[in-house]
Image (spheres, helix red, strand yellow):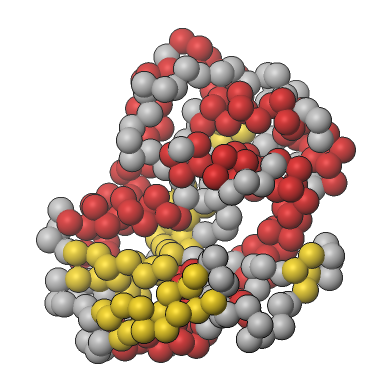
Amino acid sequence: MAEYTLKYINHRARYDAMAFIHECEQQYHEQVLYAAEVIAQNSVHKPIVLINGPSSSGKTTTNDRLAKALEAHGIHAEMISMDDYYRSVGTYEMPPDPENGVPDLESPDCMDLPLLSQHLSQLAAGEEIVLPRFDFATHTSIPEARVLRLDPDEVVLIEGIHSFNPVIMGDLAHTATGIYLSISSTVVPEEGSRLEPYMLRFLRRAMRDSLFRGSPVEETLHQWNSVRRGERLYIAPYRGQANLTVDTFLPYELCILMQHLTPQLGRYRKKLAAADLAPLAGVLGQVAPVDYADLLPEDSVLHEFIG
Protein backbone atom coordinates (compact mmCIF):
# COMPACT_ATOMS: atom_id res chain seq x y z
CA MET A 1 0.00 0.00 0.00
CA ALA A 2 1.46 3.36 -1.05
CA GLU A 3 1.41 6.33 1.31
CA TYR A 4 1.49 9.97 0.22
CA THR A 5 1.71 13.02 2.41
CA LEU A 6 -0.64 15.89 1.66
CA LYS A 7 2.41 18.17 1.87
CA TYR A 8 4.02 16.29 -1.03
CA ILE A 9 0.83 16.31 -3.12
CA ASN A 10 0.32 20.04 -2.58
CA HIS A 11 3.93 20.83 -3.46
CA ARG A 12 3.79 18.88 -6.72
CA ALA A 13 0.41 20.39 -7.61
CA ARG A 14 1.63 23.96 -7.08
CA TYR A 15 5.06 23.78 -8.69
CA ASP A 16 5.14 20.77 -11.01
CA ALA A 17 1.57 19.92 -12.01
CA MET A 18 2.24 18.73 -15.55
CA ALA A 19 5.01 16.31 -14.56
CA PHE A 20 3.04 15.23 -11.48
CA ILE A 21 0.02 14.25 -13.55
CA HIS A 22 2.20 12.48 -16.12
CA GLU A 23 4.01 10.42 -13.47
CA CYS A 24 0.76 9.39 -11.77
CA GLU A 25 -0.80 8.36 -15.07
CA GLN A 26 2.32 6.44 -16.11
CA GLN A 27 2.34 4.46 -12.87
CA TYR A 28 -1.26 3.38 -13.44
CA HIS A 29 -0.62 2.69 -17.14
CA GLU A 30 2.29 0.36 -16.35
CA GLN A 31 0.06 -1.72 -14.08
CA VAL A 32 -2.50 -2.09 -16.87
CA LEU A 33 0.17 -3.10 -19.37
CA TYR A 34 1.49 -5.75 -17.01
CA ALA A 35 -2.00 -7.14 -16.45
CA ALA A 36 -2.56 -7.31 -20.21
CA GLU A 37 0.71 -9.18 -20.65
CA VAL A 38 -0.31 -11.79 -18.07
CA ILE A 39 -3.76 -12.19 -19.65
CA ALA A 40 -2.20 -12.60 -23.09
CA GLN A 41 0.25 -15.25 -21.89
CA ASN A 42 -2.61 -17.32 -20.43
CA SER A 43 -5.35 -16.53 -22.94
CA VAL A 44 -5.49 -19.98 -24.56
CA HIS A 45 -6.34 -21.75 -21.31
CA LYS A 46 -7.89 -18.78 -19.50
CA PRO A 47 -10.09 -16.86 -21.95
CA ILE A 48 -12.26 -15.41 -19.16
CA VAL A 49 -11.09 -12.24 -17.37
CA LEU A 50 -13.00 -11.31 -14.22
CA ILE A 51 -12.50 -7.73 -13.05
CA ASN A 52 -13.57 -6.99 -9.50
CA GLY A 53 -13.37 -4.05 -7.16
CA PRO A 54 -15.40 -1.86 -4.83
CA SER A 55 -17.39 1.21 -5.77
CA SER A 56 -15.47 3.90 -7.66
CA SER A 57 -12.35 1.83 -8.15
CA GLY A 58 -12.22 2.61 -11.86
CA LYS A 59 -13.46 -0.73 -13.18
CA THR A 60 -15.06 0.63 -16.35
CA THR A 61 -12.05 2.62 -17.52
CA THR A 62 -9.55 -0.08 -16.61
CA ASN A 63 -11.68 -2.60 -18.48
CA ASP A 64 -11.47 -0.45 -21.62
CA ARG A 65 -7.74 0.17 -21.25
CA LEU A 66 -7.05 -3.53 -20.78
CA ALA A 67 -8.91 -4.25 -24.01
CA LYS A 68 -6.75 -1.73 -25.89
CA ALA A 69 -3.56 -3.10 -24.34
CA LEU A 70 -4.54 -6.64 -25.36
CA GLU A 71 -4.84 -5.54 -28.99
CA ALA A 72 -1.07 -5.00 -28.97
CA HIS A 73 -0.73 -8.73 -28.22
CA GLY A 74 -3.02 -9.65 -31.11
CA ILE A 75 -5.93 -10.49 -28.81
CA HIS A 76 -9.42 -9.07 -29.22
CA ALA A 77 -11.44 -8.56 -26.06
CA GLU A 78 -15.19 -9.04 -26.04
CA MET A 79 -17.07 -7.20 -23.29
CA ILE A 80 -19.90 -8.45 -21.12
CA SER A 81 -21.62 -6.11 -18.70
CA MET A 82 -22.55 -7.70 -15.40
CA ASP A 83 -25.33 -5.10 -15.18
CA ASP A 84 -27.14 -7.01 -17.94
CA TYR A 85 -27.66 -9.88 -15.52
CA TYR A 86 -29.82 -7.87 -13.14
CA ARG A 87 -33.15 -9.57 -12.54
CA SER A 88 -36.40 -7.87 -13.57
CA VAL A 89 -38.00 -5.84 -10.80
CA GLY A 90 -41.04 -7.69 -9.51
CA THR A 91 -39.60 -11.15 -10.13
CA TYR A 92 -37.87 -11.26 -6.75
CA GLU A 93 -38.07 -9.58 -3.36
CA MET A 94 -35.56 -6.76 -2.99
CA PRO A 95 -33.26 -7.71 -0.10
CA PRO A 96 -33.12 -5.17 2.73
CA ASP A 97 -30.11 -3.61 4.40
CA PRO A 98 -31.29 -3.74 8.02
CA GLU A 99 -28.22 -1.92 9.32
CA ASN A 100 -28.95 1.24 7.36
CA GLY A 101 -32.68 1.04 6.66
CA VAL A 102 -32.37 1.08 2.87
CA PRO A 103 -32.72 -1.56 0.12
CA ASP A 104 -29.58 -3.66 -0.33
CA LEU A 105 -28.81 -2.70 -3.92
CA GLU A 106 -25.38 -4.35 -3.59
CA SER A 107 -26.78 -7.83 -2.90
CA PRO A 108 -25.99 -10.65 -5.35
CA ASP A 109 -29.65 -11.65 -5.01
CA CYS A 110 -30.44 -8.76 -7.37
CA MET A 111 -28.62 -10.58 -10.17
CA ASP A 112 -28.97 -13.86 -12.03
CA LEU A 113 -25.48 -15.09 -11.13
CA PRO A 114 -26.19 -18.76 -12.00
CA LEU A 115 -27.04 -17.72 -15.57
CA LEU A 116 -23.90 -15.62 -15.80
CA SER A 117 -21.78 -18.49 -14.49
CA GLN A 118 -23.35 -20.84 -17.04
CA HIS A 119 -22.68 -18.38 -19.87
CA LEU A 120 -19.03 -17.87 -18.92
CA SER A 121 -18.45 -21.63 -18.65
CA GLN A 122 -19.98 -22.08 -22.10
CA LEU A 123 -17.76 -19.37 -23.57
CA ALA A 124 -14.67 -20.99 -22.03
CA ALA A 125 -15.71 -24.26 -23.68
CA GLY A 126 -16.00 -22.59 -27.10
CA GLU A 127 -19.79 -22.62 -27.12
CA GLU A 128 -22.21 -19.94 -28.30
CA ILE A 129 -24.35 -18.03 -25.81
CA VAL A 130 -27.24 -15.59 -26.08
CA LEU A 131 -26.72 -12.61 -23.80
CA PRO A 132 -29.52 -10.78 -22.01
CA ARG A 133 -29.78 -6.99 -21.74
CA PHE A 134 -31.09 -5.09 -18.75
CA ASP A 135 -33.25 -2.07 -19.53
CA PHE A 136 -32.66 0.42 -16.71
CA ALA A 137 -35.57 2.59 -17.89
CA THR A 138 -38.09 -0.20 -17.30
CA HIS A 139 -35.98 -2.23 -14.83
CA THR A 140 -36.56 -5.38 -16.83
CA SER A 141 -34.30 -8.07 -18.25
CA ILE A 142 -34.58 -8.53 -22.01
CA PRO A 143 -33.50 -12.03 -23.09
CA GLU A 144 -31.78 -12.95 -26.34
CA ALA A 145 -30.24 -9.53 -26.90
CA ARG A 146 -26.87 -10.57 -28.38
CA VAL A 147 -25.19 -13.76 -29.59
CA LEU A 148 -21.55 -14.34 -28.62
CA ARG A 149 -18.91 -17.00 -29.23
CA LEU A 150 -15.18 -16.59 -28.56
CA ASP A 151 -12.73 -17.11 -31.40
CA PRO A 152 -9.31 -18.61 -30.60
CA ASP A 153 -7.68 -15.17 -30.48
CA GLU A 154 -10.33 -13.65 -28.21
CA VAL A 155 -10.95 -13.28 -24.49
CA VAL A 156 -13.99 -11.92 -22.68
CA LEU A 157 -13.74 -9.17 -20.05
CA ILE A 158 -16.46 -8.80 -17.45
CA GLU A 159 -16.37 -6.36 -14.56
CA GLY A 160 -18.56 -6.10 -11.50
CA ILE A 161 -18.57 -6.34 -7.73
CA HIS A 162 -19.79 -9.96 -7.81
CA SER A 163 -17.38 -11.34 -10.38
CA PHE A 164 -15.41 -13.25 -7.69
CA ASN A 165 -18.57 -14.64 -6.08
CA PRO A 166 -18.25 -18.43 -5.60
CA VAL A 167 -21.33 -18.97 -7.80
CA ILE A 168 -19.19 -17.66 -10.68
CA MET A 169 -15.60 -18.29 -9.70
CA GLY A 170 -16.32 -21.79 -8.40
CA ASP A 171 -16.75 -23.13 -11.93
CA LEU A 172 -14.10 -20.93 -13.53
CA ALA A 173 -11.07 -21.24 -11.27
CA HIS A 174 -9.00 -22.90 -14.01
CA THR A 175 -10.29 -20.92 -16.98
CA ALA A 176 -10.33 -17.36 -15.61
CA THR A 177 -7.88 -14.64 -14.63
CA GLY A 178 -9.08 -12.53 -11.70
CA ILE A 179 -8.03 -8.88 -11.48
CA TYR A 180 -8.81 -6.85 -8.36
CA LEU A 181 -8.98 -3.07 -8.73
CA SER A 182 -9.16 -0.54 -5.95
CA ILE A 183 -7.52 2.44 -4.38
CA SER A 184 -4.78 0.93 -2.26
CA SER A 185 -3.12 4.18 -1.21
CA THR A 186 -3.51 6.52 1.74
CA VAL A 187 -2.95 10.26 2.14
CA VAL A 188 -1.44 11.64 5.36
CA PRO A 189 -2.26 15.28 6.26
CA GLU A 190 0.07 17.37 8.39
CA GLU A 191 -2.46 17.16 11.23
CA GLY A 192 -5.33 14.81 11.91
CA SER A 193 -6.21 11.34 10.72
CA ARG A 194 -5.06 9.88 7.43
CA LEU A 195 -7.37 9.57 4.45
CA GLU A 196 -7.97 5.86 4.00
CA PRO A 197 -8.59 4.25 0.59
CA TYR A 198 -12.37 4.04 1.05
CA MET A 199 -12.46 7.78 1.83
CA LEU A 200 -10.66 8.57 -1.41
CA ARG A 201 -13.13 6.37 -3.27
CA PHE A 202 -16.00 8.26 -1.66
CA LEU A 203 -14.69 11.48 -3.22
CA ARG A 204 -14.74 9.83 -6.65
CA ARG A 205 -18.26 8.51 -6.14
CA ALA A 206 -19.60 11.81 -4.78
CA MET A 207 -18.21 13.64 -7.80
CA ARG A 208 -19.55 11.12 -10.31
CA ASP A 209 -22.98 10.89 -8.70
CA SER A 210 -23.44 14.64 -8.61
CA LEU A 211 -22.29 15.13 -12.21
CA PHE A 212 -23.78 12.14 -14.02
CA ARG A 213 -26.44 10.48 -11.85
CA GLY A 214 -28.45 13.40 -10.57
CA SER A 215 -27.54 12.51 -7.00
CA PRO A 216 -26.33 15.31 -4.69
CA VAL A 217 -23.50 14.77 -2.23
CA GLU A 218 -25.99 14.43 0.62
CA GLU A 219 -27.63 11.44 -1.09
CA THR A 220 -24.25 9.78 -1.72
CA LEU A 221 -23.50 10.23 1.98
CA HIS A 222 -26.86 8.69 2.86
CA GLN A 223 -26.06 5.56 0.80
CA TRP A 224 -22.39 5.29 1.71
CA ASN A 225 -22.71 3.10 4.81
CA SER A 226 -24.82 0.65 2.80
CA VAL A 227 -22.25 0.67 -0.01
CA ARG A 228 -19.50 -0.10 2.50
CA ARG A 229 -21.59 -2.87 4.04
CA GLY A 230 -21.96 -4.43 0.60
CA GLU A 231 -18.19 -4.28 0.10
CA ARG A 232 -17.59 -6.04 3.42
CA LEU A 233 -20.16 -8.75 2.69
CA TYR A 234 -19.82 -9.33 -1.04
CA ILE A 235 -16.32 -8.26 -2.10
CA ALA A 236 -13.81 -8.48 0.75
CA PRO A 237 -14.33 -12.22 1.47
CA TYR A 238 -13.31 -13.12 -2.09
CA ARG A 239 -10.33 -10.81 -2.68
CA GLY A 240 -8.04 -13.80 -2.40
CA GLN A 241 -9.37 -15.04 -5.74
CA ALA A 242 -7.44 -12.31 -7.57
CA ASN A 243 -4.41 -13.26 -9.63
CA LEU A 244 -3.46 -9.60 -10.09
CA THR A 245 -4.15 -6.32 -8.30
CA VAL A 246 -4.14 -2.79 -9.72
CA ASP A 247 -4.03 0.37 -7.59
CA THR A 248 -6.01 2.93 -9.58
CA PHE A 249 -5.25 5.91 -7.32
CA LEU A 250 -3.80 8.97 -9.03
CA PRO A 251 -2.34 11.14 -6.24
CA TYR A 252 -3.06 14.36 -8.14
CA GLU A 253 -6.77 13.51 -8.27
CA LEU A 254 -7.22 14.73 -4.69
CA CYS A 255 -6.44 18.26 -5.87
CA ILE A 256 -9.14 18.09 -8.54
CA LEU A 257 -11.88 16.36 -6.59
CA MET A 258 -11.50 18.49 -3.49
CA GLN A 259 -11.59 21.78 -5.35
CA HIS A 260 -15.02 20.80 -6.67
CA LEU A 261 -16.40 19.06 -3.60
CA THR A 262 -15.15 21.26 -0.75
CA PRO A 263 -18.15 23.66 -0.75
CA GLN A 264 -20.64 20.77 -0.51
CA LEU A 265 -18.65 18.72 1.99
CA GLY A 266 -18.31 21.75 4.24
CA ARG A 267 -22.09 21.72 4.74
CA TYR A 268 -22.18 18.09 5.87
CA ARG A 269 -19.50 17.72 8.52
CA LYS A 270 -21.79 15.81 10.90
CA LYS A 271 -22.93 13.47 8.13
CA LEU A 272 -19.33 12.87 7.12
CA ALA A 273 -18.60 11.79 10.67
CA ALA A 274 -21.67 9.51 10.70
CA ALA A 275 -20.41 7.84 7.54
CA ASP A 276 -16.91 7.32 9.03
CA LEU A 277 -15.54 10.01 6.73
CA ALA A 278 -14.61 12.66 9.31
CA PRO A 279 -10.95 12.94 8.15
CA LEU A 280 -12.22 14.44 4.88
CA ALA A 281 -13.68 17.35 6.85
CA GLY A 282 -10.27 17.79 8.46
CA VAL A 283 -8.56 18.60 5.14
CA LEU A 284 -11.19 20.97 3.74
CA GLY A 285 -9.40 24.06 2.47
CA GLN A 286 -5.98 22.42 2.79
CA VAL A 287 -5.67 20.78 -0.64
CA ALA A 288 -4.03 22.77 -3.43
CA PRO A 289 -6.18 23.07 -6.57
CA VAL A 290 -4.86 22.16 -10.01
CA ASP A 291 -5.68 23.85 -13.31
CA TYR A 292 -6.06 20.53 -15.07
CA ALA A 293 -8.17 21.25 -18.17
CA ASP A 294 -5.29 20.87 -20.65
CA LEU A 295 -3.23 18.37 -18.67
CA LEU A 296 -5.36 15.22 -18.31
CA PRO A 297 -4.84 12.43 -20.86
CA GLU A 298 -7.98 11.52 -22.79
CA ASP A 299 -7.89 7.98 -21.41
CA SER A 300 -7.33 8.93 -17.76
CA VAL A 301 -9.31 6.85 -15.28
CA LEU A 302 -10.29 10.14 -13.66
CA HIS A 303 -12.60 10.96 -16.58
CA GLU A 304 -14.87 8.21 -15.27
CA PHE A 305 -15.64 10.51 -12.34
CA ILE A 306 -15.23 14.07 -13.61
CA GLY A 307 -16.18 13.72 -17.29
- Give the left or right position of residue 129, taking residue 102 as reference: left
Tell me if residue 55 comes above or below residue 84 in the rendering. Answer: above
Q: Position of residue 105 (x, y in %)?
A: 67, 68
Tell me if residue 58 comes above or below residue 307 in the rendering. Answer: below
Residue 135 visible in this rendered orientation of the protein: yes
Name the foreground residue: 151 vs 105.
Answer: 105
The quarter of the image holding the N terminus is top right
User: Image quadrant of residue 50?
Assistant: bottom left
Q: Position of residue 34 (x, y in %)?
A: 29, 52
Residue 283 visible in this rendered orientation of the protein: no
Q: Residue at x 79, y 65 (%)?
A: 102
- Give the left or right position of residue 295, taking residue 13 as reference: left
User: Image quadrant of residue 270?
Assistant: top right
- Give the left or right position of residue 168, taking residue 232 as reference: left
Name the foreground residue: 150 vs 178.
Answer: 150
Q: Position of residue 78 (x, y in %)?
A: 27, 68
Tell me if residue 244 comes above or below residue 17 in the rendering. Answer: below
Q: Position of residue 130 (x, y in %)?
A: 33, 84
- Give the left or right position of residue 100, taking residue 236 as reference: right
Name the foreground residue: 228 vs 42.
Answer: 228
User: Image quadrant of residue 27?
Assistant: top left
Tally of numbered tags: 0
Q: Residue at x 43, y 65 (%)?
A: 159
Q: Residue at x 73, y 55 (%)?
A: 223
